[in-house]
Image (cartoon, rainbow, N blue to C red):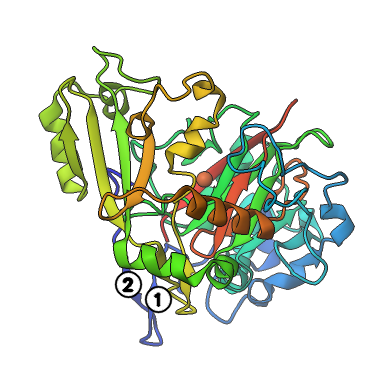
Amino acid sequence: MLGSTFPRNLTKLKTGSSRISTGWPWYNHTVRLGSWSKYNFSTHAGSHDDIKTSTSHFSPIPLQELALGYNPQIKGRPYLPGSTSGGFPEFLPGPQEGSSFPKAYEVKNSQQYDVKGWSLVCRQLIDEELAIHGAILIRNLPLSSMGDFQNFLQNLNFKFFEHGVTGYRTPLGGHVYTASDDPPEVTIEPHNECSYSPLFPKKIVMFCLREPNPSCGGETVLLKSQDLTASLDPKVIQKFEAKKIRYQAFLPNKDTGAGLQKSWQDRFWMDDPKEVQTILELNGWSYSWDKGKNLRYWYLNSPVIQHPITGEKIWFNQITSYNASYFRALPLYENTGDSMKDDQFPFHCYYGDGSDIEPEVLQHIREVMWSYAVGFWWRTFDVAVLDNQQVLHGRMGWTGDRKLVTSLIAE
Ligand SMILES: [Fe+2]
């Protein structure tokens, strides 16, 4: 992500071991919260059993309460690239029996603590279980407004990932953003957030301010990176690993209006190309200006990463969602036909040597991704936490009403 740096901060614990510090008060800190101090909710190590056994605060949500209640169409879905192929599944399924994906919990007694108290409990749950399950859904927390969520989020004590200039989100305050500003009818392909960039968030926290109307779409789509690594054609993975991926962005000059998207002046909030170049250089991106002073910048990145905890090789990229073929399917570009070249869309990617990614390879990746995708029925005031390294997320297009906000976590 441009303009953001979040170096890891290693903190020595009492035990002498090292842990990535996220501000979590592991020891030597007492929480004083007035009315709920009666719960002895201190954070002295060894003195707060109720936090250490965080799962005792939750019950599993029965599968039928997560089920979608209808069959969201995937095959042949409008604005979804590749979906007319026979390799796409017909429908998006709900969570599968016995899969624990997402791991879904309901708070047993929401009155037990206030918002800050629940932040401490949930932080413990996230630390204990997110790496195991990849995605955790938490229902029935005492959150009923954006302010409650901001308070909850702040007290999770994570280090925030500041969204940079390439994002399509609206900041809402308190490190919270709209989940996406893409038109609601668009189905967003699954992706690992900011995986085109050397800097990316490690976790994503979502909050549902208004659940989608029944059968109207808007599901968050989830799938596991390890399933893709295991199921994609190994030759496809090997080729990407050998050549890498060249992620390229295009920003037209506002004076020539060479595109439908934002100009580089509007995106960077500056008019001096030299200042823009400085930002790009500082962040390791290469760039070029064409005759019309339109800007292209690009970065070479690997298609896989090693998971920092499991050590597994994980498929981690945005080959399909950062590709012109995705944008060609959007309503905004519906009538452009062949008049726009691939490198005139906001984003496009190539193999690292600049050669085109074969359409059949893109199709293969899309078919495998959607074959593993699951959704769940958001309920108003649900919170979900995703491990951005292990889990891809997307979104089904929707009609009617639905409001989801999100926050990106650096570590
Ligand atoms: Fe995303």
Kindly tell me whether residue 360 is visible in this rendering.
yes
Quarter of the rendering occupied by the C terminus: bottom left
Query: Which mark, by number, is residue 10?
Result: 2
Three-letter amino acid code at the position of disc 2: Leu
Q: Please provide percent x and percent y for residue 88.
A: 68, 51
Residue shown at 46% from the left, 41% from the top: 175
Name the side, left or right, on which 395 lies relative to 292.
right
On the picture, is 264 further left or further right than 190? left
**Res 173 visible:** no
Q: Quadrant of residue 406?
A: top right
Instruction: Mark 2 or mark 1: name the one nearer the start of the chain.
Output: 2
In the image, taking residue 363 as reference, residue 343 lies left or right, namely left
Say which amino acid is labelled 1. Answer: Arg
Residue bearing mark 1: 19
How many marks are shown on the rendered structure? 2
Specify the label residue 317 is tagged with.
none
Up-down: is 97 above or below 47?
above
Q: Position of residue 110 (x, y in %)?
A: 77, 54
Spot occupied by residue 239 in the image (x, y as percentages of width and height): 37, 65
In the picture, residue 210 is in which quadrant? top right
Q: Which of 383 and 359 is in front in this view?
A: 359
Comparing 307 with 291, the one in front is 291
How packed mark 1 is, by other alpha carbons closer than 10 Å (few <14, some 14-19, many 20 or more), is few
State whether residue 193 is above or below residue 240. Answer: above
Up/down of 292 relative to 218, above or below: above
**Residue at left offset 45%, top offset 72%:** 307
